[in-house]
Amino acid sequence: MNSLRIGKALSLCFIAISMAGCQTTDNSHVEKSLAAELDAQLQVPEKKVEPELEAAVSDFLLAGDAPSKQSDMFIAEKYDINARQIDAVSFFSGLVKDTPFSVAIHPEVTGLISLDLKQVELDTIFELVSDLYGFHIDRTGNVYKVFPAGMRTETFSVNYLLMQRDGNTQTSIISGGVAQAGNNQNGNNNNQNGGFNNFSGNSQVGNNLGGNSFGNNGNGSNGTSITTRTETNFWENLETSLKDMLGNEKGRSVMVSPQAGLVTVRALPDEIKTIRNFLNISEESLQRQVIIEARILEVVLNDEYQQGINWNQVLAHAGSTDLGFSTSVANLGNEITASLGGITSLSFLNKDFSGVVNLLDTQGNVQVLSSPRVTAINNQKAVIKVGDDEYFVTDVSSQSTISNSSTSVSPDIGLTPFFSGIALDVTPQIDENGSILLHIHPSVIETEEQEKVITLNEEQYILPLAQSTIRESDTIIRASSGEIVVIGGLMQSVVTNEESKIPLLGDIPFMGNLFKNKREKETKKELIILLKPTVVGENTWRTQIEASRSQMADWLYVE
């Protein structure tokens, strides 16, 4: 308003100056008139803007910069419905009357509707009617489409791989025995981890041990075996489940197209809704992921801990760190080293395993053998294998050839690859609360060559056979996301020969033994496996990347 008044005054001044420049006669009368008009404009009071209007305009102008919020004017209206035996067509038509919505009703829609609702949104009303009376109701923009309660066809998109996946994990101990044919079958350990085989001992001929068995089998071998099998044929199982849900009633059908990732169902509306919920929950469960970080440690125990790691003492040192154990000192005791594969669960505040490793340093020299890391989806086996495969002789036979009154014998030698290294396979099951059930099978295998001399047809053969040292565990545990799971108690004794001598005198032939000291030293090693499962959430990958970046910065930092 001030700018408008000043503009008028300037215009009058400009006119006055122009007229004054154009006239040559006495213009005092004109100047007085213009001055009076200018004074009158300046005396006009300024019009004030109402505070409420000014605030409303300011809020409107600032609305574009504010976070998007649903304004009160766009909140869906709520209605009170009181219908008693109302014709369906009349009900739907009256429902959208005096609203910005429209309804398109199929000619075959019939029936009577009764509802008594208080303050319910329009979408909810249509959904309730669909559930109660079986009508198929779709919404496109502001238009509701109502179809009769009968068979209809709907296609769903299912995101999953077209594949069939089988896994087999076996841990067996065969003590050996005399076979029926008189052959002696040595101990065998067959470990199949997600598609790779680890064999120790000689080849198994005629041994047949079933899962979870102990006792004498047909060939006289004693032992025990644990076999875990996983079979995944998602599309076949899905089709079977959907057909079982619909039953065998007339008109219902299920068509599954794994190649396109589509499922087409023909059924009643309420049945289709049930199938839709089933597919949504199934896909949500299938897409859950877990990051499994592992540290496979070997602790060369100090002399005072030759019976295994003293976990009571480990917990006593935990006060100087930011560790918090979920198992109390009184209950923990020595349970990890008490039996093969003893389990306890640890949770701590560190973002890595350094806290646990530092605590284990109090028990002996800690060596990190491997730090595998794998991501697995729900109920799918993941395998990590680090090591070498070397071929060894596992079967020897001979073939005789007679020609020109002479007989020649040629040996037939069979070779089998033996794995030496570290293998870890895990299968996670993640529930909706983030709790994880893990099947874990870690194994550390050391295979060395052992020469055996055999006589075949009066000829001696030196065979490079395999001698394997295996430390493995097969267990199922439960953990929360971010907790540390400890698998321990896998101990090994290593005997080494140590020799000390007096310089020069100890090197004298024959007499030098008088100046030497020889002794056998036994070293105890315990294998500790730390596992940290982390359920993949919204910000999990960002956290993992930041942790990796920080770790790399520590590695690259130079004083």
Image (cartoon, helix red, strand yellow):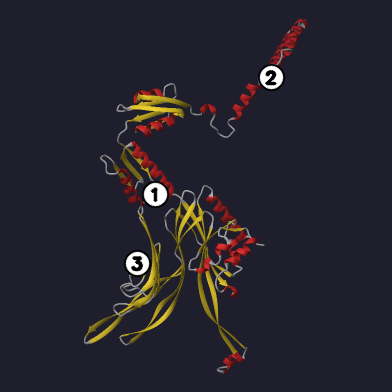
Give, as a three-letter code, the residue at label 2. Answer: Ser
Most distant residue in the bottom direction = 511
Kindly identify the residue that appears in the image at 46 percent across and 26 percent down: 79
Give, as a three-letter code, the residue at label 1. Answer: Tyr
Give, as a three-letter code, the residue at label 3. Answer: Gly
Rounded to the nearest whole Å, what is the CA distance between mark 1 and mark 2? 69 Å
Q: Position of residue 36 (x, y in %)?
A: 75, 8
Mark 3 burial class by Cα count in 10 Å: few <14, some 14-19, many 20+: few
Chain-order first, disc 1 or disc 2? 2
Chain-order first, disc 3 or disc 1? 1
Q: Are the two marked residues, 1 and 2, in contact with CB atoms closer than 8 angstroms?
A: no
Asked if residue 289 is positioned above or below residue 267 in the image, the reply reads: below
Q: Nearer the viewer, residue 24 or 521?
A: 521
Asked if residue 509 is positioned above or below residue 183 in the image, the reply reads: below
Residue 130 in view: yes
Q: Mark 2 points at which residue?
A: 3
Chain-order first, disc 3 or disc 2? 2
**Dot label at residue 210:** 3
Q: What element carries label 3?
A: loop
| Dot in front, 3 or 2 | 3
Kindly identify the residue that appears in the image at 48 percent across and 28 percent down: 76
Mark 1 burial class by Cα count in 10 Å: few <14, some 14-19, many 20+: some
Residue 386 in view: no
Q: Name the residue under label 1.
A: 160
Kindly identify the residue that appears in the image at 60 percent across and 59 percent down: 323
Give residue 483's quadrant in the image: bottom right
